[in-house]
Image (cartoon, rainbow, N blue to C red):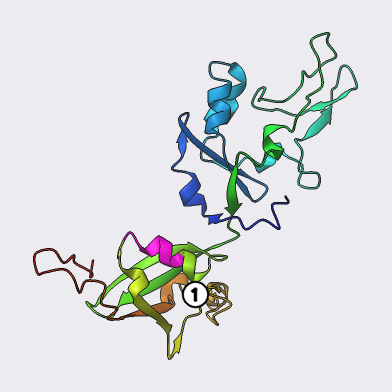
Amino acid sequence: MSSVTKDWPYYAPFEVVVHNAPDDCWVSFLGKVFNITPLLKKYEGDKCTQPLITFAGKDISHWFDEKTGDIQYYIHPETGCRVPYCPHGPIPDVSVEVPATSWKPLRRLPWWQDERYQIGLLTKRVRPVRIVNMMCPKEIVLNVCCEDTFARILQRYLMFNCDAESYTWRYLDRPIIMEKTMEENGIPDERDLFTDLGIPQNYYVPTILLYYNDDLKYINFDDNEEEDICK
């Protein structure tokens, strides 16, 4: 299934960069996010994993051809052969650079084309959004992917308020459609305009207001058992 048609989650660069260890390794390239931890485990101890470990948590798009989605190739100056371009050393599933008896064709998809390792897509842009809990009131500024629907933003917000699903989400005087993105809900990203006008990009951050719905979730709890819904 194509990465474009599959409903992949979106990740921001700051979410990828924290996975930067051999036992927890993500990389991004050509707009995709891969968890290559199983690949590193498969080739554990092999020198071909060293470039991947070095670039753990980073973007490695420069290794690949944007048009073909395959690894970059170049013409070897001595043999005149078209060979894979690996400037940081050999990587898994890349054949030898020069003609040799050890060469053999790869009878499966290389790891960079294998969707078993893909976990999502890299956002085109990160957007800030201010979320205000009108019950407290308490507010936080959350960085989200511009492609995130509000349902996804709600999932991100759960770490700050475990009862976020019990609130009505509103922007200005209208309710938020949770299945749509910020742009689709009529919340434009005006930071480029601010920059053109010489205004700091954080001069205005869109504000979402949360109103608590008394959904009787805690009706069976007594005073000692009821959880704090305003965190």
Tell which residue pokes out farthest to the top in this image: 101
Name the spot of residue 206 as percent of width and height, x first.
44, 77
Name the spot of residue 31 as percent of width and height, x first.
65, 51
Q: Is residue 177 left or right of residue 47?
A: left
Image point 43% across, 91% down: which residue? 173
Q: Is residue 98 magenta?
A: no
Name the spot of residue 103 as percent of width and height, x first.
81, 14
Q: Is mark 1 on a helix, strand or loop?
A: loop
Tell which residue pokes out farthest to the bottom in this image: 173
Magenta range? 153-159
Name the spot of residue 169 as percent of width and height, x first.
40, 79
Quadrant occupied by the C terminus: bottom left
Q: Which secondary structure type mostly characterizes the magenta part of the structure? A: helix
Q: Looking at the picture, does residue 30 appear above or below residue 54?
A: below
Image point 85% across, 21% down: which residue? 77
Image point 47% across, 50% down: which residue? 15
